[in-house]
Amino acid sequence: MTRIRFQRPPRSIMILPDMVAIPGGRLLMGWPKCPPRPGLPWVWHSDQAVRVPRFSLARTHVTNAEYRVFLADTGAPKPSHLDREGFNANRQPVIGISWDDATAYCAWLAAKTGRPYRLPRDAEYEYAARGGRSGTIFPWGDALDPRLACFGGHAAPKPVGSYPANGFGLHDMVGNVWSWCSEKFEEVSAGLKASNKPTGLDPAGNRVLRGGSYMTCHYLNLWIAYRHEDPPDLRHESIGFRLAL
């Protein structure tokens, strides 16, 4: 009798994020001031000076390739666009990620590596997006330039690193995909109440998102200073995340 041997499937190889050391410094939040825009419910506060301690931030968003390792190891729910043509390349950022999904990934990677990976804080994201500049609208200056970021209604996000890095060596701090931050919106909104409830949850639990995406068409949503708010269980095709330490 021929004995059939069953081989265990190969274990996925973990892909460690490329982390960039960000020096600490002073940040004047929400500057330049937001011009009036009818129908814009989110007004970021200006002129609040904060001190941002040094930290590390991933050079790019978490990619499909990185997220597939997490799925294989945990059996977590698969994002809706992970295997969809046009969105499934290894180097494209993973999208359709809720805040809950992103924090689960951080906890998993921290347990695997012994390093305290987490989501960036709101002030950290704004500070890092400036790349050492101060007072400019975008990471590169004040003029919106489609050669420097992915926005304006693209069909899908571009592979990470497709556009020039900012002064800290970080890619896609505006455009490509929205990034979750750790805080609740009302914890950092200077008194502005959260109102967005696409999944029916109490808006008071909404979390901060930063950066805009490939679907963003209005320039105000790409300002470094702009913060958005969404419920932690929302999985939208424009939302991904990046890691901090």
Image: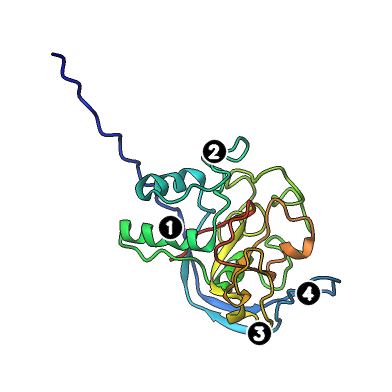
Q: Position of residue 69 (x, y in %)?
A: 40, 45
Please tell me the numbered disc located at residue 190. 3
Q: Please rate how many residues cluster around mark 2, counting C-alpha atoms within 10 Å: few if below 14, some from 14 to 19, many from 20.
A: few
Disc with the residue nearer the chain's start (3 vs 1): 1
For image coordinates 78% across by 74% down, the residue present is 34
| Residue indicated by mark 2 | 83
Q: Position of residue 47 (x, y in %)?
A: 70, 84
Dot 1 and dot 4 residues touching (CB under 8 Å): no
Disc with the residue nearer the chain's start (2 vs 4): 4
Q: What secondary structure is found at the residue carrying circle 4?
A: loop
Q: What secondary structure is found at the residue carrying circle 3?
A: loop
For discs 1 and 4, the disc positioned in front in the rendered view = 1
Which amino acid type is shown beneath numbered disc 3?
Ala
Which amino acid type is shown beneath numbered disc 4?
Cys
In the displayed structure, would residue 244 be above or below residue 15?
Answer: below
Left or right position of 45 against 8: right
